[in-house]
Amino acid sequence: MRSAIIIISILVLSACQEFIKNKTIGSEEKLSMQLGNATLWFQQSAEMEASFLQAYDKGKMLLKIKMDTLSDSGLKPAVILDLDETVLDNSPYEARLFLKGENYSSESWENWCNEAKADALPGAVDFLNFADSLGLKIFYVSNRKIGVFEPTLKNLQILKLPQAEKDHLLLRTTKSDKTERREMVKADHQILLYVGDNLTDYRQIFAERDSTLGKDLVKKHQKELLHNFIMLPNPMYGEWESAIYENDFSKTADEKIEMRRKMMDASR
């Protein structure tokens, strides 16, 4: 009887291994699999935690310096922050995609936003409370669509973030370009600092990336970036990925995978 059980177990194990070996993985699932390491790093690494804390700490230092040397422009001092992967942690959404072998879709993203349960990222609450204590106006300028305004505001209020009010939350209505919304804030405020996980959270010129994928723009504007913008790490998605796809997300999963492969530099 014991021998028979052993033989059956071996046969079942062999069958499972053969199934896994021969299982056809679709292009969409292959593309989704590339989210794995990035999401794991974002959720679990101590390096991610240190990066956010360090960036927000620099933000506090810059705000203090700028408030001490504030010009008498008659405008109220303010700070503008992105939301996703800047203030709010949406990595559980990315983890869901990875575990299901799926990729981003407007429907699944909106479902996640409607849950209103994203946590705050390391250092974000402390930075926001510090900015609030200095008397700065805080504006959350996000490319979440206006249709998820209420659950997004609810999420900010659940986290008890300062100035989480309707007039301080500017979501996307038509264009993803944030310039118009930033200009609305600048009409009555002196912006001391911008915070985000994409360079376009500072200026739209960083969307215009050539073969250097925007690195030339960073060098060109290095001084003002270091003085006016806090850059947060996001290896899961962003303008950097769009640049790899030549700003065309309509490309097929196979095309995207191939373009990623071609961008890998193994020459050094």
Image (spheres, helix red, strand yellow):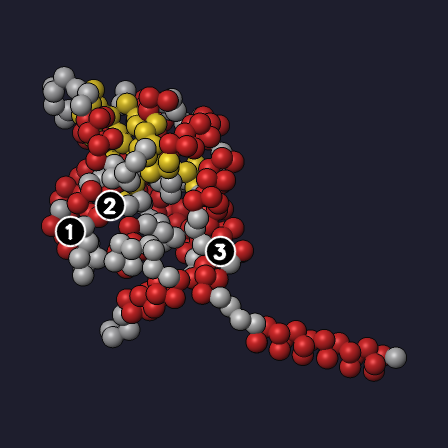
Q: Which residue position holds label 3?
A: 102
Q: Is residue 165 left or right of residue 248?
A: right
What residue type is disc 3 on? Glu
Residue 149: image quadrant is: top left
**Residue at x 43% of width, y 62% of height:** 31
**Residue at x 52% of width, y 36% of height:** 115
Q: Is residue 65 left or right of residue 235?
A: left
Residue 120 percent coordinates (x, y)? 43, 36
Residue 148 percent coordinates (x, y)? 43, 33
Within 10 Å of the Cα at label 2, are there few (<14), some (14-19), or many (20+) other Cα atoms? many
How far apart marks 2 and 1 lie (CA) works out to 10 Å
Within 10 Å of the Cα at label 3, are there few (<14), some (14-19), or many (20+) other Cα atoms? some
Q: Which residue position holds label 2?
A: 199
Q: Which one is earlier in the sequence, the residue at label 1 or at label 3?
A: 3
Q: Nearer the viewer, residue 176 or 40?
A: 176
Q: Can residue 45 be seen in this view?
A: no
Q: Which residue position holds label 1?
A: 217
What residue type is disc 2 on? Leu
What residue type is disc 1 on? Leu
Whether residues under marks 1 and 3 lie with C-beta atoms below 8 angstroms apart, the answer is no
Please determine whether, in this image, residue 243 is positioned above or below residue 175: below
**What is the secondary structure assignment of the residue under circle 2?**
helix
Residue 258 percent coordinates (x, y)? 34, 68
How far apart marks 3 and 2 lie (CA) works out to 27 Å
Task: Single out the mark in the foreground, 3 or 2.
Answer: 3
Whether residues under marks 2 and 1 lie with C-beta atoms below 8 angstroms apart, the answer is yes
Please determine whether, in this image, residue 71 is positioned above or below residue 112: above
Q: Which one is earlier in the sequence, the residue at label 3 or at label 2?
A: 3
Residue 112 percent coordinates (x, y)? 49, 40
Q: Is residue 28 visible?
A: yes
